C-alpha cells in the first residue's frame, strides 16, 4: 500500500511542473558535446582539399565495412584519395574510424536527420562528406576540455 502512495506522490509532483515540450521542426534540442552523428571528412580550409592521406586505416578498422576507399597513386610516389564512399545504412556510428585516423581527416559530425525514402540516399561520397565535415570541429575536442582525467 505504501508503494501506491509513493507512486501517486510522484504523479502529483510531476503534475505541477511546467511542460518541457519542444516543437521539433522549429526548435531542435542541443546535442551532447560528444554526440556521434554521421562520419564526415574534414578538408583544409585554405586549399579545400581533403586532409585524408589515403592510409586506409579507417576502412580496415570499421566493424561493419561501411567505408570504401579507392586510392590513386600520385606522380610523387605517394597515394591520393580517389573516391571515398560511406554507406550510412550499415554504419554503427561507433567513431572508430575517426579515432584511428592519423591526421584527423575523419570526424563525427552532429548530423542526425538522416532519414531518406530510398536506400540509395544512404550512400555518401567524398564531396558530400566534405561538405558536412567543413561545418564541424574534431568531435572529441568538443567535449574533452572540461572532463577530468580518468572519467
Image (cartoon, helix red, strand yellow):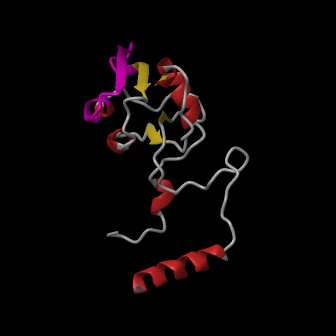
Furthest-right residue in this view? 26
User: How many marks can you see?
Assistant: 0
- Relative to 27, 115 lies left or right: left
Residue 32 spot, x, y in % from top left:
52, 57
Q: Position of residue 84 (x, y in %)?
A: 42, 22
Q: Position of residue 134 (x, y in %)?
A: 58, 36
The residue depicted at 44 percent of the width and 68 percent of the height is: 147
- On screen, residue 46 versus residue 72, left or right, reads right
- Residue 62 in percent (x, y) is at 29, 34
Q: Quadrant of the N terminus?
A: bottom left
Magenta-drawn stretch contains 23: no
Q: Nearer the viewer, residue 139 or 31?
A: 31
* In front of the other: 47 or 134: 134
Please give left or right for residue 61 compared with residue 113 in the image.
left
Tell me which corner region of the image, top left, top right, bottom left or bottom right, holds residue 127: top right
Name the image quarter holding the C terminus.
bottom left
Q: Which residues are magenta?
A: 59-80
Q: Looking at the image, is 17 positioned above or below residue 106?
A: below
Q: Residue at x 37, y 44 (%)?
A: 95
Q: Toward the viewer: 118 or 71?
A: 118
Residue 61 within the magenta-colored segment of the rendering? yes
Name the residue rendered at 52%, 19% in the picture. Answer: 118
Residue at the image position 54 percent from the left and 82 percent from the top: 9
Residue farthest toward the front in the current orientation of the protein: 1
Amino acid at each position: 500500500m505504501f508503494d501506491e502512495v509513493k507512486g501517486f506522490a510522484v504523479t502529483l509532483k510531476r503534475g505541477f511542473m511546467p511542460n518541457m515540450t519542444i516543437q521539433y521542426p522549429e526548435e531542435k534540442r542541443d546535442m551532447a558535446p560528444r554526440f556521434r552523428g554521421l562520419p564526415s571528412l574534414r578538408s583544409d580550409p585554405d586549399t579545400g582539399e581533403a586532409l585524408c592521406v589515403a592510409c586506409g586505416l579507417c576502412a580496415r578498422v570499421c566493424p561493419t565495412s561501411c567505408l570504401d576507399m579507392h586510392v590513386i597513386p600520385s606522380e610523387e610516389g605517394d597515394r591520393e584519395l580517389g573516391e571515398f564512399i560511406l554507406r550510412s545504412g550499415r554504419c554503427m556510428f561507433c567513431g572508430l574510424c575517426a579515432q584511428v585516423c592519423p591526421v584527423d581527416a575523419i570526424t563525427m559530425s552532429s548530423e542526425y536527420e538522416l532519414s531518406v525514402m530510398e536506400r540509395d540516399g544512404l550512400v555518401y561520397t567524398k564531396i558530400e562528406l566534405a561538405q558536412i565535415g567543413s561545418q564541424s570541429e574534431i568531435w572529441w575536442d568538443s567535449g574533452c576540455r572540461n572532463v577530468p582525467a580518468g572519467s
